[in-house]
């Protein structure tokens, strides 16, 4: 049992640790783990699948509260999804980025493109 | 045998250029770096730099093939971390161009920020590359409190 908990907190963001829910015209995505060369394609594939299958989705709310690390692969995957919803006239809102993630967003200029907030409730108010 | 005080601590590791090893590499380097009492923020910066360097080996140097990535790390002067990431992949045609932020040779979504992040987060970065021979990224980071 203890070993299973350790694995859950390890570096791998397996598909099981990404959860998506459709709320109105928004796709709520909750991630945990690390977003890098291995996990970014999983994120990209699952979100793109949801968007492709549901034309009414205009916004993405991305809860990164449990994401402890991101690099340029993860950043690129998020930016790619931003472009997708931008093309639909929607927004991408980031919830709860930890300092390492915030810094990557800041130095790459991504903060000029996406909005950030501290709770999912605030995020839904932003897209309302 | 040498006395303990005369030894510079160092580690060398090598592994195949599989994406699954990117997380292993940055974590291993961060564990090694932690003996310098870096702040958590500095350790995160080291992790980003290593993640980008090794990701470049996987994506660019070896591309559709799998080769060997070698990482050497050492503690210099008890206050500086030195990391070398080496591949024997296809090399970079134009190093200056590769160092420009947002330059990328691939149409996917890494934004060309990998080397920019390495430059941003490490104190010294030297990129040696020869087409057809391989690429070596030399990086150094000093503890914040020790910088001039």
Image (spheres, coloured by chain):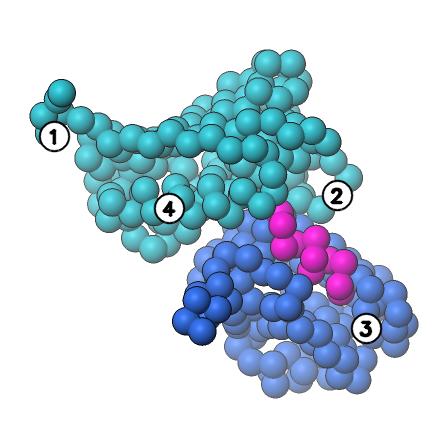
* Label 4 vs 2, first from the N-terminus: 4
Q: Are marks 1 and 3 in contact (CB under 8 Å)?
A: no
Q: Label 1 neighbourhood size at 10 Å, few (<14), some (14-19), many (20+)?
A: few
Q: CA distance from mark 2 to mark 3?
A: 23 Å
Q: Which residue is mark 1?
A: B4
Q: Are marks 4 and 2 in contact (CB under 8 Å)?
A: no
Q: CA distance from mark 4 to mark 2?
A: 28 Å
Chief secondary structure of the magenta span?
helix
Per the rendering, the colour in which chain A appears is blue
From this viewpoint, is residue A97 visible?
A: no
Residue numbers of the magenta segment: A37-47
Q: Label 2 neighbourhood size at 10 Å, few (<14), some (14-19), many (20+)?
A: few
Q: Residue at x 61, y 42 (%)?
A: B19
Chain of the residue where label 2 is placed in the rendered structure: B
Q: Secondary structure at mark 4?
A: helix
Chain of the residue where label 3 is placed in the rendered structure: A
Query: Which of label 1 and label 3 is nearer to you?
Result: 1
Location of residue B2 in the rendering, given as x and y in whole percent from the top left corner? 12, 22
Instruction: Give a yes or no on whether discs 1 and 3 share a subunit.
Output: no
Q: Residue at x 66, y 44 (%)?
A: B110
Per the rendering, the colour in which chain B appears is cyan
Instruction: Give a yes or no on whether discs 2 and 3 share a subunit.
Output: no
Q: Which residue is mark 2?
A: B108
Q: CA distance from mark 4 to mark 3?
A: 39 Å
Q: Which residue is mark 4?
A: B30
Q: Secondary structure at mark 3?
A: loop
Please say whether residue A41 is one of the residues in the magenta stretch: yes
Instruction: Give a yes or no on whether discs 4 and 3 share a subunit.
Output: no
Instruction: Give a yes or no on whether discs 1 and 4 share a subunit.
Output: yes
Query: Which of label 4 and label 2 is nearer to you?
Result: 4
């Amino acid at each position: 049992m203890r070993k299973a908990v350790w694995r859950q907190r390890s570096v791998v963001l397996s598909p099981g640790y990404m959860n998506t829910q459709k709320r109105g015209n928004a796709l709520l995505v909750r991630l945990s783990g690390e977003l890098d060369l291995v996990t970014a394609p999983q994120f990209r594939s699952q979100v793109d699948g949801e968007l492709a299958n549901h034309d009414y989705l205009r916004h993405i709310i991305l809860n990164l509260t449990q994401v402890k690390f991101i690099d340029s692969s993860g950043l690129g995957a998020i930016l790619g999804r931003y472009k997708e919803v931008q093309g639909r006239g929607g927004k991408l809102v980031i919830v709860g980025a930890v300092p390492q993630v915030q810094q990557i967003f800041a130095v790459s200029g991504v903060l000029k493109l996406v909005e950030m907030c501290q709770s999912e409730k605030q995020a839904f108010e932003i897209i309302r | 045998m040498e006395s303990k005080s005369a030894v510079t601590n160092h580690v060398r590791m090598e592994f195949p250029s599989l994406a699954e090893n990117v997380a292993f590499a940055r974590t291993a380097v961060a564990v090694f770096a932690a003996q310098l009492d870096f702040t958590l923020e500095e350790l995160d910066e080291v992790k980003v730099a290593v993640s980008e360097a090794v990701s470049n080996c996987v994506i660019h140097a070896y591309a559709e093939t799998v080769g060997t990535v070698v990482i050497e790390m050492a503690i210099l002067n008890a206050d500086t971390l030195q990391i070398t990431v080496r591949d024997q992949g296809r090399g970079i045609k134009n190093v200056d161009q590769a160092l420009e932020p947002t330059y990328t040779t691939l149409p996917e979504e890494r934004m060309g920020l990998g080397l920019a992040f390495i430059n941003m987060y490490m104190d010294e970065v030297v990129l040696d590359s020869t087409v057809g021979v391989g690429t070596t990224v030399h990086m150094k980071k000093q503890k914040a409190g020790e910088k001039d």
